[in-house]
Image: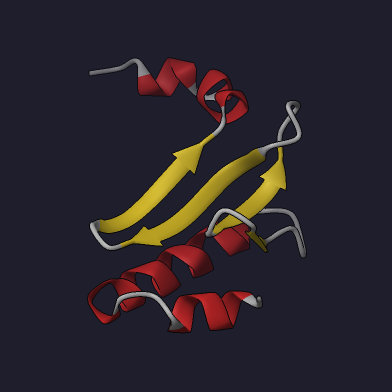
Amino acid sequence: MTIDKYLSHTPEKFRDTARELHGFISKRAKRHSAEVRGHGMIGYDKGTDDFVLVGLAVRSAGVMLYASADILTAHANVLDKK
């Protein structure tokens, strides 16, 4: 399934948000790294564990973002600030 097809089949109330997030993440991810994964999400880049660095999924409850441990570790100094 293509990313455009995936996004067009998402719940309408979340579609614009998902498209905007996809555009935002795509500009910052490696070229051509985005793909629709078998478990119903768009994956961007790959981490050391061979899983996606960032994932975007649209569920019935909303838009979900997933971050790998590689991302969280790399930005721990910023994420820890309150």
Which sits in the foreground, 63 or 60? Answer: 60
Which sits in the foreground, 70 or 14? Answer: 14
Q: Is residue 43 above or below residue 46?
A: below
On the image, which quarter does residue 81 sit in?
Answer: top left
Residue 75 on image: x %, y %: 51, 24
On the image, which quarter does residue 13 sit in?
Answer: bottom left
Classify residue 78 as left or right of residue 26. Answer: left
Residue 43 on image: x %, y %: 62, 53
Classify residue 76 as left or right of residue 48. Answer: left
Q: Is residue 75 above or below residue 14?
A: above
Quarter of the image where the C terminus is located: top left
Classify residue 59 as left or right of residue 30. Answer: left
Which sits in the foreground, 59 or 24? Answer: 59
Quarter of the image where the N terminus is located: bottom right
- Residue at 53 percent of width and 49 percent of height: 55
- Residue at 60 percent of width and 74 percent of height: 3
Q: How many marks?
A: 0
- Residue at 56 percent of width and 23 percent of height: 69
Q: How is the image coloured?
A: secondary structure
Q: Is residue 23 above or below residue 64?
A: below
Residue 30 on image: x %, y %: 74, 54
- Residue at 34 percent of width and 76 percent of height: 15
Classify residue 57 as left or right of residue 46. Answer: left
Residue 39 on image: x %, y %: 57, 53
Q: Is residue 76 above or below residue 41?
A: above
Q: For the view shown, which residue lies furthest in the front direction?
A: 39
